[in-house]
Amino acid sequence: MREGLDVSKVLADVLYVGDGTVLKNAELSISDGEITDVSEFRPQDPLPVNSVRAAIAAPGFIDLQINGAKDRQFNDLPDVESVRAIAEGARVGGTAHVLPTFITAPGRAYELAGSAVREAQSAGIPGVLGLHLEGPFLNPARAGIHDPAFMRTLEPEDLERLSRISTGTLLVTLAPELQSPGVVPVLKKHGVVVFAGHSDATAGQLCDAKKDGVSGVTHLFNAMSQSIAREPGVVGGTMADDDLYAGIIADGHHVARDNLKIAAEVMPDRLC
């Protein structure tokens, strides 16, 4: 529920349960912040006391990649107030949980992001699941908006420092084709979720990375090797795989609508 909204019932014209079930005219009874019952209401009846009417009700969204909100960018101000702004701004659009995302920056600036997220969690800021580090371990050939001057391979000291970032979920996006052998398995050993992104890997290299522990890709189609006749690249390799997940920027600008449609149809249970 939205902060400060004290209601005991939500009357939803359409309720998306979250398991594929869609209900119409659904009345959700709420007690102590939890849904205790779901029944049907008649649209013509007056609203019960302490209730709200909603066109759509659905489980809160989870955003794996959010760089800022409310006029604050995490990379510009990697502090607890930026994390708070991201979490609060995301909730306005129905996102209940976030991974604040820190992109390529000089040296080991990512540690500032880790400290900010830890402080936010200690302060009880709701909805902060952990941290997403998108770089700097990326391929300059697929830099996108990231500054290639700060891109580099992941070093042993990075492994040690990343293993000490205790923020709940830690998602690291990297270019697997540029990393030393054994890097991804060590990250996985420490509980890090590893995605491929800003990568020029072949489909074969992506397959090898998956065997090492890569479980998905960041912003499918953008800043990665594309699918051509004799080389599926990261895009084709991801869609052809049965297990890899993929984030995608579904704003109609970053990815053509036809590509969104293809991805959604090919990997309906693996697309974020």
Image (tube, rainbow, N blue to C red):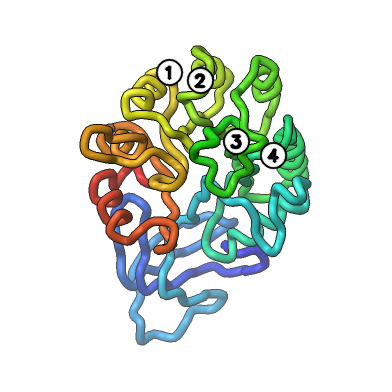
Secondary structure under tag 1 reads helix
Residue position marked by numbered label 3 in the rendering: 135
| Closer mark to the observer between disc 2 and disc 4 | 4
Q: Which circle's residue, 1 or 4, is located before the other in the chain?
A: 4
Whole-angstrom CA distance, mark 3 to mark 2, is 14 Å
Q: Which circle's residue, 3 or 4, is located before the other in the chain?
A: 4
Q: Are marks 3 and 4 in contact (CB under 8 Å)?
A: yes
Pick the front one: 124 or 232: 232
Residue position marked by numbered label 4 in the rendering: 105
Answer with the quarter of the image where residue 130 lies: top right
Q: Which circle's residue, 1 or 3, is located before the other in the chain?
A: 3
Name the amino acid, label 4: Ala
Q: Is residue 250 visible?
A: yes
Q: Are marks 1 and 2 in contact (CB under 8 Å)?
A: yes
Name the amino acid, label 3: Gly
| Closer mark to the observer between disc 1 and disc 3 | 3
Percent coordinates x, y for residue 141 in the rendering: 50, 37
Pick the front one: 270 or 47: 270
Residue 184: which numbered mark, if any?
2
Residue 212: which numbered mark, if any?
1
Pick the front one: 14 or 179: 179
As drawn, 237 above or below 125: above
Residue 265: which numbered mark, if any?
none
Q: Residues within 10 Å of mark 1 (few under 14, many from 20)?
A: some
Q: Are marks 1 and 3 in contact (CB under 8 Å)?
A: no
Q: Residue at x 68, y 64 (%)?
A: 70
Whole-angstrom CA distance, mark 2 to mark 4, is 21 Å
In the picture, measured across the screen, residue 54 lies left or right of residue 263, that is: right
